[in-house]
Amino acid sequence: LYAQTAVQFLVAHVLRHHVAAPRNPPERVLGLTQAQVKQVDAYISAHLHEPLTLDGLAAVAGYSPYHFARLFRQATGDSPYQYLLRQRVAGAQRLLRETALPVQEVALACGFTNQSHFTRVFSRLLGVTPGAYRRAVAPDVRPHRAGESR
């Protein structure tokens, strides 16, 4: 998703600065409506554990990937990729608080490809590792280890 967004912005930059402007440029698109943002948010929440693409999110809102990425940033303050990461971390926070799933399973359940990536993103956004977060907010929750009876 991040790479797709970067490519879309690069292509737009090249076109904007190195191609002659049309004589009658199209009218500016006003932006995403609150309903469209909610629709994309609901889609992300429902598919949080799956790999999501910029094309897929743009299709939900009814825009091209380039326009969607630009309008989404205007509407939410985050790129689609950053928004997705924040939603995944929020889901992970809930699972760490409410379940005894091991951190690795929480990472996979929230759509991260591995625990290392999950820990890096979680730490960058919240300033604490997932394990430390769990100990702070749910000290009685003890994750089950492989081979232990539940």
Image (cartoon, rainbow, N blue to C red):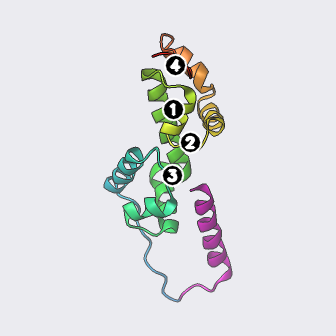
- Dot 2 or dot 4: first in sequence order is 2
Residue of label 4: 144
What is the spatial separation of the Cα atoms under label 3 and label 1, in whole angstroms? 15 Å
Q: Is residue 80 magenta?
A: no
The circle drawn on residue 112 is 2
Q: Marks 1/4: CA distance?
A: 12 Å
Question: Which residue is found at the position 54% from the left and 15% from the top?
Answer: 136
Image quarter hosting the C terminus: top left
x and y percentages locating residue 148 in the rendered image: 53, 16
Amino acid type of disc 4? His
The amino acid beneath tag 1 is Val
13 or 128: which is nearer to us? Answer: 128
| Residue interval drawn in magenta | 1-22
Q: CA distance from mark 1 to mark 2?
A: 9 Å
Disc 2 residue crowd, few under 14, some 14–19, many 20+, Cα 10 Å: many
Residue 19 percent across, percent down from the top left: 64, 84
Left or right, 52 with respect to 122, comes to: left
Q: Earlier in the sequence, mark 4 or mark 3?
A: 3
Q: Residue at x 44, y 58 (%)?
A: 57
